[in-house]
Amino acid sequence: MVATIVIFLLAGLAEIGGGYLVWLWLREGKPYWYGIVGSLVLVAYGVLPTLQSFPSFGRVYAAYGGVFIIMAVLWGWLVDKKMPDLYDWVGAAVCIVGVSIMLWAPRG
């Protein structure tokens, strides 16, 4: 369970961080190397979820999507300095519940 969470967190940081660097390059005029580094980080994001022990691609990526949403809300708050509102927090809580159900529900 700990390894699952760590891999999801690393994948989330890679996706958000890589995307953010590309955003800064294309939208905010940062040097081209931001785009190159961001692209390389996004490649790492593509590899990280494959380290999960779950056999189903769809289930892993669906669960990761919930983790990504939570991390994106936190990134917006901590990096972009945009305070999430009540609905952002409620949505993030729903995502946590959904991810937990998808990954750890007993299956027959």
Image: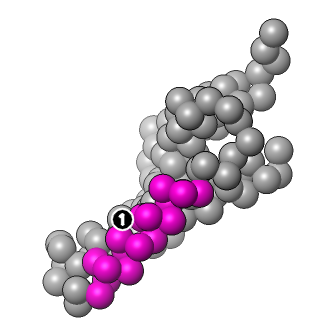
Q: Is residue 74 visible?
A: no
- Whole-percent x, y for residue 65 in the image: 50, 40
Rendered position, 37 above or below 104? below
Q: Nearer the viewer, residue 14 or 97?
A: 14
Tell me the amino acid under the disc marked 1.
Gly
User: In percent of the image, x 44 and y 64: which residue is there?
Assistant: 43
**Residue with the mark numbered 1:** 19
To which quarter of the image does residue 71 belong? Answer: bottom right
User: In percent of the image, x 77 and y 28: which residue is there?
Assistant: 104
- Whole-percent x, y for residue 6 in the image: 72, 57
- Whole-percent x, y for residue 14 in the image: 50, 65
User: In percent of the image, x 22 and y 86: which residue is there?
Assistant: 32
Say whether residue 34 is magenta: yes
Q: Is residue 13 visible?
A: yes
36 sits to left or right of 7: left
Which quadrant is the C terminus positioned in? top right
To which quarter of the image does residue 103 belong? Answer: top right
Write down the region rendered in magenta.
33-48
What colouring method underlies this structural image? one colour
Say whether residue 22 is magenta: no
10 sits to left or right of 34: right
* Label 1 secondary element: helix
